[in-house]
Image (cartoon, rainbow, N blue to C red):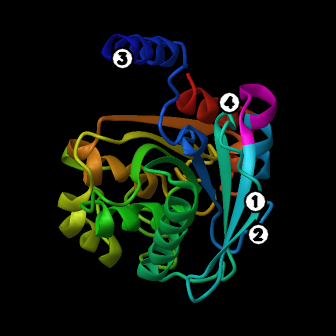
């Protein structure tokens, strides 16, 4: 009897050895998403050129649109199959006119938390244009120390107004950065960012900073001074894994047109998926 039992156990173990092992929760594993954030007064279609080219040229997959209302409530439209290659998420702020950086960065946090809860993301990449950069930057400055939140990997900043907008915060003057890349004058939000930069994840994030110069001698993209866009390095440089800037010139370097400029789009995609 005991001999028969031992034989039966041996047969059972042999049979189990032929069963292929499957990774736990394989159905919920997703690739790192890339989020696209529009700028001030821009609409749901503002980042479409970037998204569509990524789909056509880099085999990425547009999966979701995340719409955020004034209360931070996030609504998803679309579908995100677990096996989607290079998933792309468009972020749309219903209130596209706010200039309150705490508010817009809280909205961005709400999007990331919703993606984490519903789709299990733990990391993300982001492409932001104009004021969308304030959402990314101040989210990381205010919440970047919390490891339980999704962690930023790659960040593309396009036409960022990191140290203010001419005619809004200060008059347009002094187009040269000072020693170490310090901007010649500092607006209140930039000063606040300097005080919070210790919260930005250390040596984790790779940044591509893109700005435009119209070539008219004023060193701006028609809206943002180049020194404002380039001041990101002084703010975050020591905290970053890598940092690269790209300047684009000519008519397509105008502030609004940078996000549809084919050369800019090519540079963005090469940085995200080299």
Viewed as shown, does residue 67 lie left or right of 173? Answer: right
Real-space Cα separation, disc 1 to disc 2, in angstroms: 6 Å
Q: What residue is drawn where x is 73% and y is 50%?
A: 63
Numbered disc 3: secondary structure: loop
User: In front: 190, or 195?
Assistant: 195
Residue receiving disc 1: 46
Residues shaded magenta: 55-61
Real-space Cα separation, disc 3 to disc 1, in angstroms: 76 Å
User: In front: 272, or 2?
Assistant: 2
Numbered disc 1: secondary structure: loop
Q: What residue is drawn where x is 31% and y is 59%?
A: 148
Of circles 3 and 1, the one toward us is: 3
Magenta-colored stretch includes residue 36: no
Q: Tell me the quarter of the picture where residue 142 sits.
A: bottom left
Tell me if label 1 and label 2 are in contact, CB under 8 Å. yes
Q: Looking at the image, is mark 3 or mark 1 earlier in the sequence?
A: 3
Q: Is residue 209 visible?
A: yes
Magenta-colored stretch includes residue 59: yes
Q: Tell me the quarter of the picture where residue 3 sits.
A: top left
Q: How far across and how far down the image is residue 175, in percent?
A: 40, 54
Numbered disc 4: secondary structure: helix
User: In front: 170, or 62?
Assistant: 62
Q: Which mark is residue 43?
A: 2
Residue receiving disc 4: 266
Residue receiving disc 3: 1
Q: Looking at the image, is mark 4 or mark 3 earlier in the sequence?
A: 3
Viewed as shown, does residue 260 lie left or right of 126? Answer: right
Q: Looking at the image, is mark 3 or mark 2 earlier in the sequence?
A: 3
Q: Looking at the image, is mark 4 or mark 2 earlier in the sequence?
A: 2
Please tell me how crowded label 1 is: few (under 14), some (14-19), or many (20+) other residues with Cα within 10 Å. Answer: many
């Amino acid at each position: 009897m005991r001999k028969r039992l031992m034989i039966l156990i041996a047969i059972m173990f042999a049979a189990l050895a032929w069963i292929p092992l499957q990774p736990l929760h394989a159905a919920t594993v997703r690739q790192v998403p890339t989020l696209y954030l529009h700028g001030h007064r821009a609409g749901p279609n503002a980042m479409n050129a970037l998204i569509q080219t990524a789909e056509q040229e880099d085999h990425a997959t547009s999966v979701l649109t995340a719409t955020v209302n004034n209360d931070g409530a996030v609504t998803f439209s679309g579908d995100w199959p677990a096996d989607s290659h290079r998933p792309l998420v468009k972020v749309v702020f219903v209130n596209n006119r706010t200039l309150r950086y705490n508010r817009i960065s809280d909205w961005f946090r709400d999007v990331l938390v919703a993606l984490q809860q519903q789709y299990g993301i733990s990391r993300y990449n982001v492409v932001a244009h104009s004021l969308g950069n304030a959402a990314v930057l101040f989210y990381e400055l205010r919440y970047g120390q919390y490891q339980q939140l999704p962690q930023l990997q790659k960040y593309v900043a396009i036409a960022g107004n990191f140290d203010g907008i001419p005619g809004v915060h200060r008059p347009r003057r002094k187009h040269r950065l000072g020693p170490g890349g310090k901007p010649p004058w500092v607006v209140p939000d930039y000063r606040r960012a300097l005080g919070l930069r210790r919260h930005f994840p250390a040596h984790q994030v790779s940044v591509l900073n893109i700005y435009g110069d119209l070539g008219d001698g004023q060193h701006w993209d028609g809206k943002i001074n180049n020194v404002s866009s380039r001041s990101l390095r002084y703010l975050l440089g020591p905290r970053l894994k890598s940092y690269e800037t790209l300047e684009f010139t000519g008519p397509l370097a105008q502030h609004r047109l940078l996000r549809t400029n084919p050369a800019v789009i090519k540079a963005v995609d090469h940085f995200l998926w080299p």
